[in-house]
Image (cartoon, helix red, strand yellow):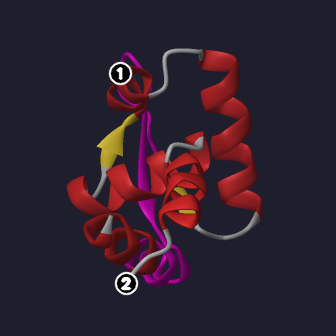
Amino acid sequence: MINKGLSVKISAVLQAPCVRILLFLYQKGEVRYTELTNLIASRGTLSLNLKELDEEDLIQRRVVTTKPIQAHYSLTDKGIEIAKHFNKIKKKL
């Protein structure tokens, strides 16, 4: 059984932008940048979190040089493993 006080804190962690992005990519697979802007309204927050996730080797970026240029994001193997754990926690709440 999950402690009620602890579950509130875990719920807050699950709402953190980085975690929301990981869970979204885990559910959707590869997505375009524009899809992520629907998830995280602030482009500054989104860009910062994508940079941090990339630096941690949790996501990968694929650029398609068509007109207009498109950026696609997906999870790395490491990102999938971490997202699996967050997903399990989310399901238990």
Separation (CA) of disc 2 from disc 1? 34 Å
Q: What element carries label 1?
A: helix
Amino acid type of the residue that numbered disc 1 sits on in the rendered structure: Asn
Magenta stretch encompasses residue 71? yes
Magenta stretch encompasses residue 46? no
User: Disc 2 designates what residue?
Assistant: 1
Does 14 appear above or below 3?
above
Q: Residue at x 59, y 49 (%)?
A: 18
The one nearer the camera, 14 or 69, is 14
Stretch in magenta: 63-84
Q: Is residue 22 left or right of residue 42?
A: left
Q: Position of residue 59 (x, y in %)?
A: 54, 61
Q: Quadrant of residue 23?
A: bottom left
The one nearer the camera, 59 or 70, is 59
Amino acid type of the residue that numbered disc 2 sits on in the rendered structure: Met
Q: Position of residue 64 (x, y in %)?
A: 40, 39
Q: In which quarter of the image is residue 25?
A: bottom left
Q: Where is residue 52 in the image (x, y as percent from the top left)?
A: 75, 51
Q: In this view, does 46 lie to the left or right of 48?
A: left
The one nearer the camera, 89 or 23, is 89
Looking at the image, is mark 2 or mark 1 nearer the viewer?
2
Q: Residue at x 51, y 43 (%)?
A: 15
Count neighbours of disc 2 (C-alpha within 10 A) and say few if under 14, some if 14 to 19, many if 20 or more.
few
User: Disc 1 designates what residue?
Assistant: 38
Q: Residue at x 49, y 16 (%)?
A: 41
